[in-house]
Amino acid sequence: MSALEIGQKLVSLCKEGKFEEALQELYGDNIVSIEGQDMEGMPARMEGIEAIRGKNAWWSENHEIHSVDVTGPYCGHRQDQFAAEFTMDVTNKPSGERTQMREVALYTIDGDKIVQEEFLYLMG
């Protein structure tokens, strides 16, 4: 599959809330995930599919997701990358704080699998 095809599939699954299915179907076993910063109890850089499953479980356990919108994929001249924009309305369960978040995710593929995801936040 091309970066465009993988991106279209990822965006479609995420729009449907099928994050675990996206992980199972599209991510490589040696995936590298890079957040913009460390989070409480969660390092910014994680490696391996099981670590990413753990990160997703932590996110679900600590956040009530009210809505998720995904835009993309955005593709450029590189055949091994695409980006998607996520807009989320979530409540942090421990603090009770509700926030609206926007982030861009840059994905790198190798063959038919996502091998790296990097999340970029709007700062400043």
Image (spheres, rainbow, N blue to C red):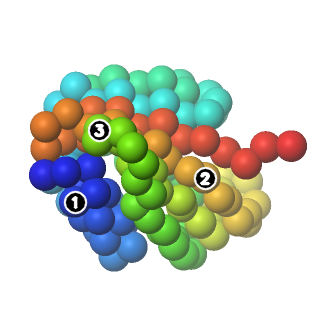
- Asked whether the residues under the numbered discs 2 and 1 touch, taking CB atoms below 8 Å apart as contact, a structural biologist would say no
Q: Is residue 83 left or right of residue 29?
A: right
Q: Residue at x 49, y 68 (%)?
A: 71
Give, as a three-letter code, the residue at label 3.
Asp
Cα distance between the residues tagged 3 and 1: 11 Å
Q: Identify the disc placed on residue 103.
A: 2
Give, as a three-letter code, the residue at label 2.
Glu
Hey, which quadrant is residue 31 in on the image? top left
Q: Residues within 10 Å of mark 1 (few under 14, many from 20)?
A: few
Cα distance between the residues tagged 2 and 3: 20 Å
Hey, which quadrant is residue 97 in on the image? bottom right
Which residue, given by chain and number where applicable, does mark 1 sit on? 5
The reply to whether residue 63 is in sight is yes
Give, as a three-letter code, the residue at label 1.
Glu
Q: Residue at x 65, y 58 (%)?
A: 102
Which residue, given by chain and number where applicable, does mark 3 sit on? 80
Secondary element at image label 3? loop
Q: Residues within 10 Å of mark 3 (few under 14, many from 20)?
A: some
Cα distance between the residues tagged 2 and 1: 21 Å
